[in-house]
Amino acid sequence: MAANPFSLDGRVALVTGGNSGFGRAIAMAFRDAGAKVVVGARRADRNAEVVAALGADASAFELDVADEASVERTIAGIVQRYGRLDILVNNAGTVSRQSVMDLDLAVWDRVMNVNLTGAFLCTKHAARVMKTQGSGKIINISSVYGLIAPSKGLQVPYTVSKHGLIGLTKVNAVELAPLGIQVNAIAPGYHYTEMTEELRGSSLEAAAKRRIPSGRLGEADDLVGTCLWLASRASDSVIGVCVPVDGGYMASDGLDRG
Ligand SMILES: NC(=O)c1ccc[n+]([C@@H]2O[C@H](COP(=O)([O-])OP(=O)(O)OC[C@H]3O[C@@H](n4cnc5c(N)ncnc54)[C@H](OP(=O)(O)O)[C@@H]3O)[C@@H](O)[C@H]2O)c1
């Protein structure tokens, strides 16, 4: 066993949505900690770019987390290439912004299928492999909107799916803990990634800066320390929790007291 409890030496990690934003930053940090990293996302060109940056032990699968056959192919391919799967980061996600009164069922289904059903499907097939090993780590990337709703609403299936992901974390954590598999979640606050690109220079960005106690929005790298901890032996007794990484957002009532 490595002396450093945060070492991922020899571990095999699948990061869904690993070709962009948080996923890319997590993939790089896991590689630096000694893991063999697999990126799972839909865009082949973006996957290839990340694998080139990650180096020889890395690989990518064209994965659509909402498609069970695609998830099964990916997990089987990982086991075929690496012989094991130690860490799953359910990071793939998408967002929509519409009034509940105008929301098409197709949009609801798309967001729920990626953000919540996708995490369920990846967990289902990864946990089967982890069970045979007697060990594993599953990290679900939720959101502060898994804990509260955005002011004025609008991100309806996003908010519901991210709340659901915290429920999925707890119920799976309880079932899988006796098998040596630890399941936890992270609730990021506002960070600059492609998903939040339109924030830059907006009135929402200014409002967020006023609302966040640290006074700043995060960068994709701000998530990697917590992710590394939850992926490593250092967190073996941490089970079923959701850790906000949000600059203090959830700690404050947010009222502007002038
Ligand atoms: N940025 C923030 O402020 C923030 C805050 C809270 C939570 N989050 C969460 O953090 C996670 C990562 O988001 P990000 O901010 O890093 O956004 P991003 O840069 O837009 O990355 C989203 C990733 O998800 C992948 N993806 C989307 N649909 C997919 C599917 N059906 N199957 C597989 N992969 C899929 C995308 O790759 P392809 O398009 O190639 O498939 C991409 O790699 C999301 O779950 C998001 O909800 C972000």
Image: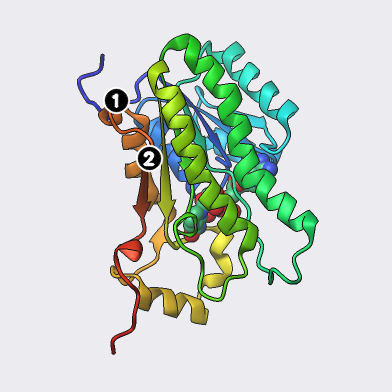
Q: Secondary structure at mark 2?
A: helix
Can residue 21 be seen?
no
Residue at x-position 52% and y-position 79%: 202
Residue at x-position 52% and y-position 44%: 165
Which tag, 1 or 2, sits closer to the chain's start?
Answer: 2
Q: From the viewer's perspective, is 18 left or right of 254? A: right
Quarter of the rendering occupied by the C terminus: bottom left
Residue at x-position 52% and y-position 51%: 163
Residue at x-position 71% and y-position 29%: 68
Horizontal and vertical percent position of residue 30: 40, 33
Task: Please name the amino acid that badge 1 sits on.
Answer: Arg
Horizontal and vertical percent position of residue 70: 72, 29
Q: Picture quarter containing residue 1?
A: top left
Q: Picture quarter containing residue 208?
A: bottom left
Residue at numbered disc 2: 227
Task: Please name the amino acid that badge 2 sits on.
Answer: Cys
Separation of marks 1 and 2 at Cα, in angstroms? 12 Å
Q: From the viewer's perspective, is 64 left or right of 122? A: right
Q: In front here: 108 or 193?
A: 108
* Residue farthest to the left, as pictured: 3
* Residue farthest to the bottom, as pictured: 258
Q: In front here: 251 or 52?
A: 251
Can residue 40 be seen?
yes
Q: Residues within 10 Å of mark 2 (few under 14, many from 20)?
A: many
Q: In front here: 90 or 3?
A: 90
Depicted 217 relative to depicted 51: above or below: below
Residue at numbered disc 1: 233
Q: Are marks 1 and 2 in contact (CB under 8 Å)?
A: no
Q: Residues within 10 Å of mark 1 (few under 14, many from 20)?
A: some
Depicted 232 relative to depicted 213: above or below: above
Horizontal and vertical percent position of residue 222: 36, 52
